Amino acid sequence: MRIALVTETYPPEINGVALTVAGLVEGLREAGHTVQLVRPRQVDADVQDTNGDSVLVRGARLPRYPGLQFGLPTTRRLRALWKSERPEAIYVATEGPLGYSALRAARAIGIPAATGFHTRFDDFARHYGFGFLTPVVFAYLRRFHRHGAATLVPTAELRDFLIENKFGNVVLLRRAVDHRMFSPARRDEALRAQWGLKPGQLAVLYVGRIAPEKNLQLAVRTFREIQKIHRDARYIWVGDGPARAALAAANPDFIFCGIQRHEALARHFASADLFLFPSLTETFGNVTLEALASGLPAVAFDYGAAREHLRPEYGRCVRFGDEAMFVRETLELVRADVTAPAIRAAAAAAVADLDPATVASSFAKLLAGIAERNPAASTPGRFSEGAT
């Protein structure tokens, strides 16, 4: 197939949407599909495109999210592009101005488009002091996704929620995790030594944006309770964000490793002993899959990836919003010895079947289905090389 993917975030930016879309692009290309990637130009990126068929558009900085941006409206350009280089189907991964422009252009020239529901922006509004806008944001999301032929979601829970809230044609597409990257074999004793750990000492890990919406105070409180059992435990923080400076000042014993990518990130996962994920605002939570694939027991609230994949044999799935239970279940898991080889093996085995190639194949079949049902379909054009 000839497929156009539209996204307002992409690596080297680090977030769940960027990494998920990049995985889909890679999987589709490896399967022989032709993929045209439409995204904002990343002015700070060292490498603009490694494949030669990205369409780079203008973007603007996203307030309160340094390093991220949204694409500016570009309906006319996309309509002209897709008239001359017609894809069989379009996937719109983000709901910003660029995504909306893509849906308008696709509809104008009769190309079927699927959308992805990756982020609960209505929850983000509440955590950043704009709670009064939550109903407005949710209404926009519903209106946006109604323009697509299908709305793709990563969990059955989210699918059911959107259907109940009158979103149309919601389709489940599981997330994948790269087992070539995230594996227990990446464990690195030298890295643990850099963290100041001796054999047998406990390393607790946080990976993600260090920001208010991640419920970080619960993570801190839980770790302090862990220290009553393991006095020499260390808390390792991977990532960056607006709350980092204050968190570091208040907790000088925490180890902040900054943003890590690729093999370095995989080594950090595999070299820890317990993953705490107290966030209440995830649409999915890719880091939960990466932790499990790395053989890392995890504690998270009962929604998103945790509800789908976390089991008592290798972690704890805690009643949503129950912070006391989060602390209590974590301590029970720690007392059961999270470093036991059987627990780590069970964690890795739990997500072994979430293969990127399988997910990409399911994605391609879904797009082929909406293309076949499209009454306005015509012979697709050929994507040009290196469009910018």
Image (cartoon, grey):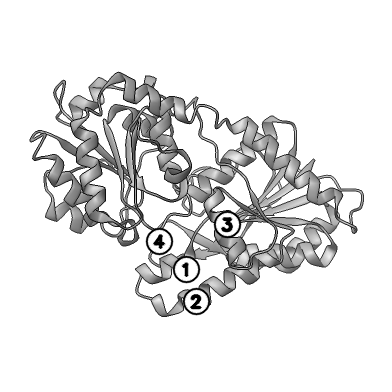
Which of the two residues, 190 or 171, is positioned nearer the viewer here?
A: 171
Mark nearest the camera among 1 and 3 is 3
Q: Residue 65, which numbered label? A: 4
> Residue at position x 50%, y 76% from top?
135
Mark nearest the camera among 2 and 4 is 2
- Find disc 3 in the rendering and name its residue: 160
Task: Tell me residue 358's x, y (percent).
Answer: 64, 32
**How far apart, in angstroms, are the residues tagged by discs 2 and 4?**
22 Å
Q: Residue 14, which numbered label? A: none
User: Few, some or many C-alpha atoms within 10 Å of disc 2 (few <14, some 14-19, many ≥20)?
Assistant: few
Q: In the shown orientation, is residue 142 left or right of residue 372?
A: left
Mark closest to the chain's N terminus, 1 or 2: 1
Q: Is residue 40 above or below residue 269?
A: below
The three-letter code of the residue at mark 1 reads Asp
**How far apart, in angstroms, are the residues tagged by discs 1 and 2?**
7 Å
Q: Are marks 1 and 2 in contact (CB under 8 Å)?
A: yes
Task: Tell me residue 267's x, y (percent).
Answer: 35, 28
**How far apart, in angstroms, are the residues tagged by discs 4 and 3?**
30 Å
**How far apart, in angstroms, are the residues tagged by discs 4 and 1?**
16 Å
**Which residue of the protein is positioned furthest toward the bottom in this rendering?**
132
Determine if residue 162 is in view: yes
* Circle 1: element type: helix
- Find disc 2 in the rendering and name its residue: 135
Which of the two residues, 349 or 324, is positioned nearer the viewer here?
A: 324
